[in-house]
Structure formats: structure tokens, C-alpha cells
Amino acid sequence: MKWSGQLNTETIDRVVREAGKETERSGAESESRLRFRLSLEEMLLNCREQCTEEAVFTLRMVRRGRCLAAELLLPEQYREDPAAPEDPLVRLRREWKRGTGRRKNSWLYTVSTERSFAELIRFIWNYTRPYKRWLLFVVLAQALRAAIQVIVPLISARVIISITDKATEQILLTAVILLVVNVISDVNFIFCNLAYNSVYNKTLTLLEEDLAHHALRITIQSVDRKGSGPFIQRLTQDTAQLASSLSALVDVISQFVEKIGILVAILIMDRVAFAVVAAILVLQVVIENIRTIRMKRDDQLFRNANERYTGFVNEMVRGMKDMKLADSENAFESEMVKRIREANHRRLKMWNHSAVYNLIRLLIESAGTFGFISVLVLLLVKGHIQPAEALVLFNYRSGIQLTTIQLIGAILQLIRETELSAERILAIIGGPEFPKETFGPRHLNRVEGEIRFEHVYFSYDRKYTRNPSGWVMKDMDFAIHAGETVALVGASGSGKSTILSLISKLYVASRGVVRIDGVDIRELDRETIRGHISVVTQNPYLFQMSIRDNLRLVKPDLTEDEMRDACRMASIDQDIMAKPEGYDSLIDENGVNFSGGQRQRLAIARALLKDSSVLILDEATSALDNVTQKKVWQAISAVGQSQKTVIIVAHRLSTVAGADRILMIDQGRVLDQGTHQELLARCGAYRRLYEAETESDAEQVQGRSG
Ligand code: ADP
């Protein structure tokens, strides 16, 4: 397909729409289609900004294997400007690869239509590769097992022939060989299982750890959009599903191999001496019974450990924002690794116990086979059966055909299940569906705390960046000096929290630049941004661990004195000490056993502990009573006087009246700025906000006295 036209809105809209349809026809998933359309639109709009509307472009799309290649030929005037790290350009440059040499004006984009099975196998192999020796052992053991299963019926046939010949010595000798071969087969089976379980368990551990690592780095925007469901499902259900389908697959394949040999022998046993087979069966059932009781207990322990892990994953997603802001990904990750390992260790233990019982069961079966042949000998010697009757036992081959077909069906189904789980997991690890946060290379050892917004535009949804009504922030331009205490005030929804999110790079400006200490925030690394900025929100997230461990998340080497000092400053020490277990008290899920005010104060203590250059408080004391609020503000003022930059968003103007400067925010831009007195004198909107607050306070006082 090929389109050409001038860079006017009409043509751009038409080409984008038709190119979108082309991706739909080629079977690309909806996420990739949307990304391509948005990227193409931005690319063309970007080009229009540099060139004129009359300039001509060409788009060509061709299918290449499982991908769709889009080639965009832009006018010569279009150039990339490496000096301008404008966000859309940075992203576009990553998405569109520029041609070289004579094709300098051509830009290439590849839309992935689906992942190949080979790609998925390669993906799983990445996690299995470290254990390839074990895997080789599994393959060799399986091969030995298959060989034995072919040999066993042959030996059995030898026994039968010997029986017809009444060569008793020969019979017993072959039976002994059969016993030895069976024991080797059983031991081989168990070792093969142990090795397989080990490979499976280690692979799963690596996979889950890697998945946790990647999930922690997904952008907040993507988490906002997707919700927690896909994360919880994919991190817990799909990894388990992938592992269990893989395990079932190996199991079914080995059954398949085994059936061909073993079934014949077992069918023979059933027919000849039912009593012997029944006795063996009863014994096996008894062992199986003991095994299941034991397994149930082991399974319980495993599930408990697994629940602790799953619960933590849930918390990770819900508390992701606070965790990122507290720069505690590493502490969180090590706790996660601990829980992953505990759960998987429990599972391995469960399997090992099960393997021991399987060994006993199989040995009984082998002994039973020996006993069964001995009975045959006895029957022959006593003349109860004729040699010809023994031969009849070979005729029970029907049914195997059916089993084989069923097994092939099961193998195919399992391959599909494995494929599906692998695809869903891969999407989190490396797919475009879950973009990861990106940071620049620049590291600042010291951050003074100067913050600057230069003509910043922002929209939460990329789709609306062309539509002026979609901007949450429009030409935001202000500076906060290092060491200053600045308050942001304005009506709810005016964009105050969005400013704070852009400072801590939870979101990235759609246009314009945010600078920290004069450096574009997009050039700075994660530690410089998150390590030097502390944020306390209105509903801070406390994790389901002790108070001490919650505080340790921001400072792993926390001392008792530091902890108590910070809590005293945040006026929460007394509340904690009043609890029977003090700082070791456990915080329930979502902090439900703490009041809103206590949670806020704990979060303030956590932020104070981080000792960062910039302290951001977003309605952080809204749930406190007046007396406590006053005390906490005194502590915060002390921080403000210690050369730290403090940025406050507070609903009550009386709490921010003492700030060095107040920015009045209105509909995504700075309406006015100055001290409380200056704004009262000249800013009507500010005065109205202040008067409304004083009036409502007076009404409340009246209401109480009335
Ligand atoms: P304020 O802090 O002044 O109350 P916010 O910065 O929270 O305002 O919100 C500004 C605008 O952005 C509001 O219209 C709000 O609905 C919207 N908004 C805030 N957060 C999100 C989000 N995560 N996704 C989409 N829109 C959002």
C-alpha cells in the first residue's frame, strides 16, 4: 500500500486512518496498532511544524514475515535536531529509524503482528540456559527411559518363551535380569524427575524475579491505564500456568514414551494373575494415600508462602507510586526476591517428598512384576496353565492406539497453553504494551533544589495532545529557587498535583522542559531525581510490614535514634510507642489499622528520613487536627529553614500563608505569584479563595457555638 499527499490536516487524518486499517488487516494486536497510528500522526504533525503544509510526503507499507514495515518519505527540509531534547522528538526518534545515505529522508517503523513460536521458545530458553547441564541430564535420562521401555517387553517375551519351553532356570535368570532392568528404570525415572523439578523450579524463580524487576519499572501512565489486574494475573497466574503447562508437557511426552512399552507389560500382568496384580495395586493405593496426606500438608505450606508472595505483588502495584517516589525499588525488590524464593523452595520440597513416595510405589511395582513372574512359574510347574496360555498375554495391545492419539492431542493443547502464557509474560518483560520508565545518563551527586518549568504543556493521554481541551497544563512557566518554601494553591483540578508528578518524573512533559538545578529532567538518572526528592501525598501508602520496616524502605541502614527523631518531628512517636509492640507493630494491608492522620504523619517521618534536597507535600496534613497540624508544620518549617526546597500543596490557605512565595494555579497555568500579602492585595482569584475559607471557618465556629 502507498499513499502520497501534502502535509495538511485532511491528508494526515486520511493517511493515518487508512494506514491504521492496513495494520488491522495484517493482524497486529490492538496495542501495536494504536501505538503505530499515534506515532505516525505525531511524526507527520511534527514534520508539518518544520516544513510547510504544501510539502509532500509518501507512506509505503509492506508485509515482511510476521511484521509490517512502514516507510515514510519526508520532505528534505525535515531534519532531526539533536540539540532539542523535546519529548515527542526523543520518543519518535526511538520509534522511527532513519535511513542512511541516499535514503536519508526515509523513516522506518516496524509494526509487529505476532510473536513466532521460535521467539517464545527462545524467550523461555533464556531462563533455562543457566541450567542447561541439568536439562541435558533430563534429556539423556528420558532417552534411557525410552530405551528401557523397549527392552522390558522384549525380556518379558523371553520369559514367556522360556515358560512355554518349561526352562525354569532360564525363566528365573530372565526374571532376575528383568528385576535389575526395572530397578534401573525406576531409579532413572526418579533422578530424571528430580533433575527436571530442579530445572523447572530454578527457571521459574529466575522468570518471576525478572518479571518483578521489569514490572517495577513500568511507567505510572501504563499502570493508570491497565489497572492492577494484568500485573497480578501475569505475575502470579501466568508464570505458574507457563510452568505447569511446561511440566505437564514433559510429563505427557514421557507418558507417551512410556505407554508404548509399559502398557503392554501391565496388561499382561492383569490377565495372568489378577490376585497378584490386585495385591500390588492395594499396596500402591496405601502408599498413594500416605503420599497425598503428606502432599496436602506440604501443599498447604507452599500455598501459604505463595499467598505471601501474591499479596506482596498486589501491594507492589497499589503502592508503586509511593515506592517510586521514595526511591525504594531496591529494598522492595529484595523483599520480593525473598518471598519468591521461599514459595519456590516450598514447592521443591513438596515435589521431593512426592518423589520419594513415587520411588517406593515404583519399587513395589517392580517387586510385584518379579512376584508376578514367580507366580507364573509356580502355575506352570504345578500345571495349572499351559505355556500357550502365557502367550495369550501378549495379545493385549488394543487401547494403546487410542491412548497414543489422546496423548498427541494433549501435547498440542499444552503447547498452545504454554505459548499463551509465554506471550502474556513476555509483554510485561519487553513488549510495547507495558512501556518502561526511561531515565537519562546524567548523575548529580548534589542537588541544590532549584526547579524550573519552561513553557510546559502536559496531557495525561497522548491521544489528546492535538486537542487543546486535552491539555491539563498549558504553557506552565515558573521557577522555584533552591532553599525556597513555595506553596501551590488553586481550585481542585487546576493542575497542582500534576506539577508535583512532573517534578518527580512520574510523568514526562508533553512539550517544554522541566529542569532540576538547571538540567533537563530527561537527562538525569533515576537516583538523582528520586533520590533527592521526597514526596508525601494525601493518601500515602504504607506497606504490610512493621513500622520499622516501612521506614527502612527509604533508608536501609536506619538507626534507632534516626528513626525516633524523624517520628518525633512528625509527631507520631508517641502514637507508635503507645502500641504494645512499638515500632515492631505490623501495619495491616493498606494501613487500615492506622488512622488517616497517623498514616500521613508516618509518611512525613518517612520523607524526613530520606533527607532529600526537595520536600514535596501534597495535602500531606489534610487529615490532622489543628493542634497536631501546627506541630507538624513547625517541623516542616524547620526543614524549610535548613536550605531545603519545600513545595507545598495545601487546601487551607492559612497553612501556607507563611511560605516564601505562593503560586496561584488556574487551569494549568500560573495566574499570579507572590507572598500571601502581595496576592491578597492584587490577585482577585486568590482573595476570593481566601475569603471563602475565612467565611467557612466563621460559619463553622458559629455552628459549633450555636
Ligand atoms: P489538583 O491537584 O489541582 O487538584 P490535578 O493535577 O490532580 O489537580 O489534576 C488536574 C487535571 O488532571 C484534572 O482535570 C484531573 O482530572 C486530571 N488528572 C489528574 N490525574 C490524572 C490521571 N492520572 N489521568 C488522567 N487525568 C488525570
Image (cartoon, grey):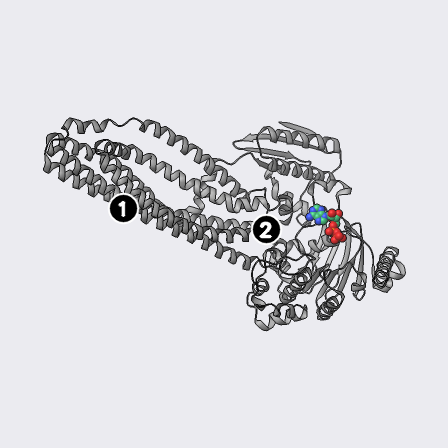
Q: Can residue 455 be seen in the rendering of this structure?
A: no
Residue located 68% across and 61% down the image: 600
96 up-or-down from 549: above or below: above
SS for dot 1: helix
Query: Tag 2: residue type?
Result: Val
Frontmost residue, 190 versus 611: 190
For the N terminus, the image quarter is top right
Where is residue 124 shown, x and y percent of the image? Answer: 45, 43
Which comes before the other along the chain, label 1 or label 2? 1
Q: In the rendered view, does 643 fall on the left or right side of 178?
A: right
SS for dot 2: helix
Query: Tag 1: residue type?
Result: Val
Q: In the rendered view, does 422 fall on the left or right side of 393?
A: right
- Indicate yes or no: mark 1 CB to ligand 1 under 8 Å: no
Frontmost residue, 674 versus 572: 572
Frontmost residue, 261 versus 527: 261
For the C terminus, the image quarter is bottom right
Marks 1 and 2 close (CB-CB < 8 Å): no
Q: In the rendered view, does 3 fall on the left or right side of 367?
A: right
Where is residue 13 shown, x and y percent of the image? Answer: 71, 32
Label 2: few (<14), some (14–19) or many (≥20) C-alpha neighbours in 10 Å: some
Q: Which of the labelled discs sits on residue 479, or is there none? A: none
Residue located 41% across and 30% down the image: 409
Q: Which residue position holds label 2?
A: 317
Where is residue 387 shown, x and y percent of the image? Answer: 14, 28
561 up-or-down from 431: above or below: below
Where is residue 50 shown, x and y percent of the image? Answer: 73, 41
Q: Which residue position holds label 1?
A: 187
626 up-or-down from 142: above or below: below
Residue located 41% across and 51% down the image: 297
